[in-house]
Image: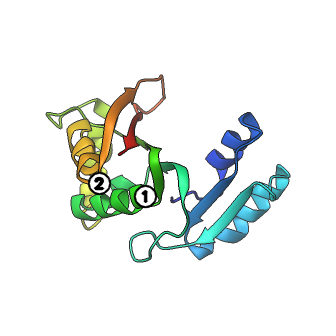
Amino acid sequence: MGGGPGTYSIHFCLNNPQLKSTVYDLPTTRPFAEKTIAKFNLQDRIDFKNADYLEEDIEGVFDVAWLSHILHGESFEDARKIVRKAVSTLEPGGLIIIHEFILNNTMDGPLFPALFSLNMLLGTPGGQAYSEEQLITMLSDAGVRNFQRIYFDSPNDSGILTGIVG
């Protein structure tokens, strides 16, 4: 959801020959996404669906949902709504992966996510970076269990949190 030009879908498909992907994003993103996907000759494996994931239902049934840097632009309630929608499309045992600027549970660090959160608070009606605890609450409320935080080196302290449906 919020797949933009399909960059993650492209790289996931290039590294997993059996994978098929659907990018959900706004219609204005479609021409650039289709051009980028075609550049890697993946049109037969990556589909693009026009969707405003806040306002519209997400169609289809999937094994995995990848939400990368979309929750921070929304209020807690809207972010929770997006998570619920993503989870509702997953098969039992499906995997949800959230890639975000994840704050610690005291909401005062790491530095880049904290500064980014301040930027979201100033520049959006309700956006902010969320703590691991807040993200787990959103996921738990949607029926997700078995959480795992995946740590990796990134230039901006982004993080990944996963969970299993059911």
Task: Say which residue appears at 78% left-offset and 62% top-offset.
Answer: 35
Q: Which residue is mark 2?
A: 142
**In percent of the image, x 40 and y 31: which residue is there?**
157
Is residue 22 in view? yes
Residue lying farthest left? 106
Q: Amino acid at mark 2?
A: Ala
Q: Position of residue 95 (x, y in %)?
A: 46, 42
The kind of residue on which mark 1 rests is Ala
Helix or strand or loop: what does disc 1 sit on? Answer: helix
Dot label at residue 86: 1
**Eyeballing the image, is 48 above or below 111?**
below
- Could you tell me if the residues under marks 1 and 2 are in contact, i.e. CB atoms within 8 Å? yes
Residue depicted at x 48% and y 22%: 153
Above or below: residue 140 compared with residue 3 = above
Q: Secondary structure at mark 2?
A: loop
**Disc 1: CA contacts within 10 A as few (<14), some (14-19) or many (>=20):** many
Instruction: Choose top left, top right, bottom left or bottom right for residue 75.
Output: bottom left
Q: Quadrant of residue 79?
A: bottom left
Residue 115: image x %, image y %? Answer: 29, 41
- Residue closer to the observer: 136 or 123: 136
Looking at marks 1 and 2 on the same chain, the residue that comes earlier in the sequence is marked by: 1
As drawn, 149 above or below 79: above
Q: Circle 2: is it few (<14), some (14-19), or many (20+) Cα within 10 Å?
A: some
Question: Rounded to the nearest whole Å, what is the CA distance between mark 1 and mark 2?
Answer: 9 Å
Please give the name of the residue rendered at 33% of the width and 33% of the height, measured from the top-left corner: 146
